[in-house]
DNA sequence: TCAAAAGTGTTAAGTTTACACCCATGA
DNA sequence: TCATGGGTGTAAACTTAACACTTTTGA
């Protein structure tokens, strides 16, 4: 069938995922050696082409699930990257997404299969095409989100210590936070609640474990950390 | 030539522009009657297809310039919209951009040719496809930007009164601001400077005209209004 | 017993908000 | 002379930032 649209060109459309995790006080991003030509073997983000009958959001979700074995991942669109020559293989318009995940839930075998590798955000190697730019844009978005939406928890296990939480904020925002001020503000948030649990993995004394209460957040979703 | 990419599908890619202006204390957006099938005649944003050798940003710029006759328009990407059935004509992935412009500079003839029409943001008709959603996303982005970047001036003539500036902030943020507090904060911004000019169009006494000093802004680009 | 991380309050500085009257002018 | 929009300052409330010592416990 010929429609008005048919006279216009078509393009390959890809999604690229900036997958963040948090481990040992460091914010990390998942990179892989590109598995096909051109520029096979270079460090790149996880990506793939959008399928014919697939929403772009679903394409991103598919790639994330394939690579990590996790469902229900927190994911947001970063934006579209569409310079003519951004991809040296052919014209490809790519939509970048960032995702936050708890590294404990990742299927390490899948990571290994995909020659994937967690790299510290402050120590990235040179990347393929405009992928460095995509990561910077994702980070910028993450930084503005983290202080107003309770998304940091997506990067932590269900129970976490306040020290972990603070290190997470410091890693994302890239500055030091005063411990007493941080704890005071957290203690005023009704949706962060203390559990019975104690984590002794980092100190002899042990640190109290907290959890995020989704329901309490729904009741009172405004905050500023 | 066959590449690894060739096995993947291609898509129409469009850009849609949310063009804002400010007139008589109201924030407005440019709409048109869709000039082709399907759904010809319905209210829609200004849009068009991306060309084969054109950056997506350039496509947005092209459409904006065609429709307004203005160059150097302030423009930012809002994001990609790519649900499978968002366009009832065929699968089209669309990248939304918003633009800010001084309505005095618009070529009204071009607007008329394109059956374009400025509609108050708080009184929008039902729109084609996901265009309402695009406008809401653009507004959200504009709201977060306006308080930290000096982009409001893009919507005003080169010289403007403080009353105009305040009404602009009120229209975008959708709440009333205290006049004395607003003026106090503005007077602390080194890049908003008083000119000799006086505008008598709104009062007998006349209001001082101010201008935005790009250079002073470069020297001290941090503020919060 | 000591090293290492956890936990805990107060004060000063800065920012934000609320609020009401006089001024200049042209009609 | 009066109606209209332009222009101006202060005090109270709130928020943020700076700062140091005690506790617990396993090695």
Image: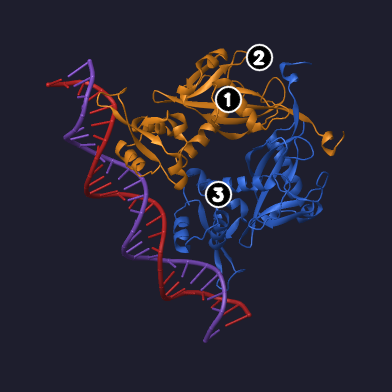
Chain colours: A blue, B orange, C purple, D red
Q: Which percent across, then down, holds residue B25?
A: 39, 25
The residue beneath circle 1 is: B64
Badge 1, how many Cα within 10 Å: few under 14, some, many 20+? many
Protein chain holding label 3: A
Q: Are marks 3 and 2 in contact (CB under 8 Å)?
A: no
Relative depth, front residue between A40 and A206: A40
> How much space separates mark 3 and mark 2, taking CA atoms?
42 Å
The residue beneath circle 2 is: B36
| Residue B152 in view of the camera | yes
Q: Which percent across, then down, holds residue B154?
A: 47, 32
D2 relative position to D24: left or right: left
> Which secondary structure, mark 3?
helix
Relative depth, front residue between A94 and A48: A94
> How much space separates mark 3 and mark 1, taking CA atoms?
31 Å
Badge 3, how many Cα within 10 Å: few under 14, some, many 20+? some
- Circle 2 or circle 1, nearest the eye: 1
Residue B207 placement: quadrant: top left
Q: Against A212, is B98 above or below? A: above
Q: Which percent across, then down, holds residue A68?
A: 73, 50
The residue beneath circle 3 is: A143
A60 relative position to B153: left or right: right
């Amino acid at each position: 069938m010929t429609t008005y649209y048919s006279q216009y060109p078509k393009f390959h459309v890809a999604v690229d995922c900036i997958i963040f995790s948090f481990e040992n006080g460091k914010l990390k991003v998942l990179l892989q050696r590109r598995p096909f030509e051109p520029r096979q073997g270079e460090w790149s983000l996880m990506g793939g082409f959008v399928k014919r009958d697939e929403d772009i959001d679903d394409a991103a979700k598919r790639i994330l699930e394939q690579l990590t074995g996790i469902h229900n991942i927190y994911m947001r669109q970063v934006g579209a990257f569409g310079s003519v020559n951004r991809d040296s293989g052919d014209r490809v318009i790519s939509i970048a997404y960032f995702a936050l995940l708890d590294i404990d839930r990742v299927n390490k075998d899948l990571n290994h299969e995909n020659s994937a590798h967690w790299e510290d955000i402050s120590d990235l190697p040179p990347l393929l095409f405009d992928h460095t730019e995509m990561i910077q844009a994702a980070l910028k978005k993450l930084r503005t989100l983290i202080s107003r939406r309770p998304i940091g928890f997506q990067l932590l296990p269900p129970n976490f210590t306040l020290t972990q939480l603070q290190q997470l904020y410091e890693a994302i925002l890239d500055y030091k936070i005063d411990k007493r001020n941080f704890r005071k503000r957290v203690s005023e948030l009704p949706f962060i609640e203390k559990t019975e649990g104690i984590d002794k993995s980092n100190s002899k004394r042990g640190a109290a474990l907290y959890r995020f209460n989704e329901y309490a957040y729904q009741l009172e979703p405004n905050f500023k950390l």
